Image: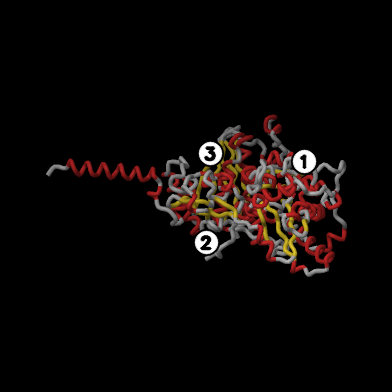
Amino acid sequence: MAILLEKSFPVEAGAYSTAGEASTTIKRTLKQLGISTEVLRHVSVACYEVELNLVIHSLGGTLTLLVDPEKVTLISKDVGPGIPDIEKAMTEGFSTANEEARTLGFGAGMGLPNMKRNATEFDIQSEVGVGTTITMSFALA
Amino acid sequence: MPQKRFHSVRLEADKCRGCTSCLKRCPTEAIRVWDSRAHIIDERCIDCGECIRVCDYHAKVAVTDPLETIQKYKYKIALPAPSLYGQFKDLRNISQVLNALKAIGFDDAFEVARGADVVSRAIRERLKNPDIPRPVISSACPAIVRLIQVRFPDLIDHIVDVRQPMEVAAMIAKREFARKNNVEEKEIGCFFITPCPAKVTAIRNPIGHPTSAVDGAISVLEIYGLLSSELRNAPVDISIETASDLGVGWARSGGECNAVCPENSMSVDGIENCIQVLEEIEDNRLKGLDFFEGAACAGGCVGGPLNFENNFVAKASIKRLASRDPDPDLNVSSSMMTKYNLYDSDQIRPNSAMKLDEDLIEAMRKMDAIEKLYAELPGFDCGSCGSPTCRTFAEDVVQGNATRLDCIHKMREQLRIMAQQMVDLAQMKR
């Protein structure tokens, strides 16, 4: 089905002061579209996690929202550093968050597992030195 | 067409100058300024009273009942909000307020703080149920409940299904008065002494239950003068003070948390602060939080726009008055918990006033059109067009409620083009 709505948000590495702004705008958009509260709940959680991941772990990237009549899709694409061992990164409790992020209450190692739990479909592709792309979709029906 | 809703917050059109003060402060973007006067979008207004607070011309008002209304009932009971006690600087004793209320025409005064005691216990019980999503959200501030309906529909099932203290107080007051005086309950009128318009709306148009047990609402400001003069002679009688310090504490932000769930709870006051924290709750960022108390007004109910006293002063007074007991506990017996209907009967429904369209595909088309127009707008959020922001202006245009040239910057652009065309025309050689 054709994509009817696309919005992209640049997310800067280490920009804690603006972290969460993309998620807030995405939530507002979905509420205006009248997306069901059930889907909204899942998107909210996954969206914030993935945005924060870009801030904490990446060298910067883009968060993209796509909406078509069947699903909401979130794509997080960064420019590095890439994840050496995806399986390990997907393990609950595993985290490489730095001291700064931990002081702010992040780094519990629940980010990726949480995203996977909330999305209908979850895909992660990563190459060290190139970057990581996370694609999550949320079925509307 | 949606039914016309009751709102306590109204506009006095002849006082409105069409400025942008209220436009900018409305948390649900429910105000537009068209033809030099403000208009309130009925479906979006949550009666929080922010516009009343910020209007320099006093054009925004709250509709409450005049004191004479109580004469419609044979027996009249005042239900003072605990925040009322904070309105008098030299008040020594809560019983003086209760006695002064009787002196101005009520047959009895029943403390809403005692309703808060019962409600606190009911919420404590609810918190034992792990199936209610965390954090459980207080239902006490009607403006916050309506805010959630409009802006956070996915958090509705967090709202605790216990009625507000004024509802419970009215039920108990009527039954106890009827029994004691051997009269019928329907002959008794219970009047809430209200600090805010949201409570007035909650009485006329309740959420969670079909009808209110409260028969009317009189604003604190309406009776402030009368009450102050009666207070000078009002006798002290601590035996008529029946609410606990915890119940009285509900008057200020943090009081409910204190009474319900002192650990793992959070109290937030001011509607913008509440919005920020609700965003966090929505993103599941507040893990481990059991209870959230949100008050639309700064300071809690003591900050209500229909109060007389500054909210910090009132808060200090409440703190002093609610320190009678070194180790306070709720004043509520077990029988109370079963004797009255403390719980909501109806499910709270989302308010779809923010939705662009009922049809998803149509909504997406509109969203696309909004994005395109928004990209062309200056982004000053000046409010000259009558919409609070450039973004809402784009929404209004796409929804057919405004036209592009309502934007003075777009208009200027258009004029420049036309002027140039005229110059070109004038310089054309035959």
Figure quadrant of the C terminus of chain A: bottom right
Tell me the tag on residue A10: 3
Please, what is the three-letter code of the amino acid marked with disc 3? Answer: Pro
In the image as oriented, which residue stretches furthest toward the top? A99
Which residue in the protein does label 2 denote?
Answer: B359
Is residue A95 shown above or below A42? Answer: above
Q: Is residue B425 left or right of residue B112?
A: left
Q: CA distance from mark 3 to mark 1?
A: 48 Å
Camera-nearest label, 3 or 1 = 1
Which residue in the protein does label 1 denote?
Answer: B319
Judging from the image, mark 2 belongs to the subunit labelled: B
* Residue drawn at 60 percent across, 49 percent down: B49
The spot of residue A80 in percent (x, y) is 58, 34
Badge 1 local density, few (<14 within 10 Å), some, or many (20+)?
A: some
Determine whether the residue tagged by mark 1 lies in a helix, strand or loop: helix
Q: CA distance from mark 2 to mark 1?
A: 51 Å
Determine whether the residue tagged by mark 3 lies in a helix, strand or loop: strand
* Residue drawn at 65 percent across, 52 percent down: B222
